[in-house]
Image (cartoon, rainbow, N blue to C red):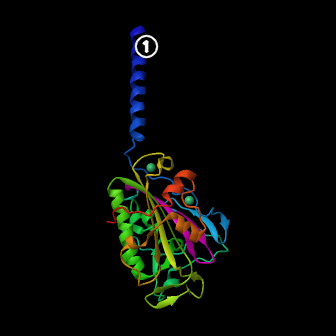
């Protein structure tokens, strides 16, 4: 009996060591994961109101404005854990998860307006599954965007974000729009769809760049790269997003939001006052 008991003990020791290793592998700092979209904060304190309604989806979180027919902002985590082979679904459609008394924008509301159905969270950032990609085509993720802003300036900023991911980073991206009136391919407009959708005047994005790791919010320091961009929603927009780099503080002043609010106030004070001067492609 005695040697048998020793074997059983040895077996459990080996098991404990192995499971310890498995735990270490699971939390290895260089393994990309899908993390919480609002880890760095809820910029407008979105909740249940008509003009600041919080929608949390597996793929992104947003504040919806029923008076504007657009999101105020959309926030999402981006790492290679979100990227796969799913093709572009192109299934623009109303978001029926909005409350019953909200207007649900439909894809034809944009027809002939001269503005693109501009994604906030881009299709190409959500390609792990067809369902993930499909979620980006909900109309609650769209705003009327001048075609040159969408297809040139914004497209190159979006691909630069994915390049940062390819280089071993994970990103927290917050994007939004504000103001009224822009110029698409059919001229200047304040609203479309008989006033149900406001054409934003400015379109902005804030990108927090971290090397792949865990406990992200606590790794944001005064050295962390933060790219803030604020562009005009006009077809005359310059195709280089680098021309529109600004500070997070400036975007906060324009929108009234507190961006990156889960980061310590001392760190926010530094990273929100700095204009990014890093590479742009
Ligand atoms: Mn992480
Ligand atoms: Mn802030």
- Which quadrant of the rendered structure holds the C terminus? bottom left
The magenta span reads 61-81
Q: Give the residue displayed 39% in from the left and 10% down from the top.
A: 3
Where in the figure is residue 279, as x and y percent of width and height? 33, 63
Helix, strand or loop under label 1: helix
Quickly name the residue at label 1: 5
> Between 78 and 234, which is closer to the camera in this rendering?
234
| Magenta-span inclusion, residue 243 | no
| Residue 142 in view, yes or no | yes
Where in the figure is residue 72, as x and y percent of width and height? 57, 70
Q: Is residue 263 left or right of residue 67?
A: left
- Above or below: residue 29 compared with residue 147: above
Q: How many marks?
A: 1
| Magenta-span inclusion, residue 79 | yes
Q: Quadrant of residue 244?
A: bottom left
Q: Give the residue displayed 35% in from the left and 59% down from the top.
A: 164
> Between 278 and 119, which is closer to the camera in this rendering?
278
């Amino acid at each position: 009996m005695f040697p048998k008991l020793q074997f059983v003990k040895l077996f459990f020791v080996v098991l404990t060591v192995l499971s310890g290793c498995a735990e270490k592998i699971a939390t290895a700092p260089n393994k990309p994961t899908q993390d919480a979209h609002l880890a760095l904060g809820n910029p407008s304190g979105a909740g249940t109101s008509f003009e600041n309604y919080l929608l949390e989806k597996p793929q992104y979180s947003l504040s919806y404005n029923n008076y504007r027919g657009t999101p105020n902002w959309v926030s999402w985590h981006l790492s290679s854990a979100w990227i796969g082979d799913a093709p572009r679904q192109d299934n623009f459609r109303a978001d029926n998860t909005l409350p019953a008394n909200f207007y649900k924008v439909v894809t034809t509301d944009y027809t002939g307006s001269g503005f693109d159905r501009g994604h906030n969270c881009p299709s190409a950032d959500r390609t792990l599954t067809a369902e993930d990609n499909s979620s980006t085509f909900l109309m609650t993720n769209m705003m009327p965007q001048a075609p040159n802003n969408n297809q040139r300036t914004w497209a190159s900023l979006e691909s630069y974000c994915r390049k940062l991911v390819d280089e071993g980073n994970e990103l927290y991206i917050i994007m939004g729009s504000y103001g009224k009136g822009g110029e698409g391919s059919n001229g200047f407009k304040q609203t479309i769809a008989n006033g149900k959708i406001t054409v934003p005047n400015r379109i902005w994005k804030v990108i927090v760049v971290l090397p792949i790791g865990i406990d992200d919010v606590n790794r944001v320091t005064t050295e962390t790269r933060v790219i803030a961009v604020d562009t005009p929603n006009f077809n005359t927009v310059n195709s280089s997003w680098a021309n529109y780099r600004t500070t997070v503080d400036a975007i906060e002043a324009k929108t009234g939001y507190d961006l990156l609010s889960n980061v310590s106030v001392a760190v926010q004070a530094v990273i929100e006052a700095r204009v990014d001067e890093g590479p742009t492609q």
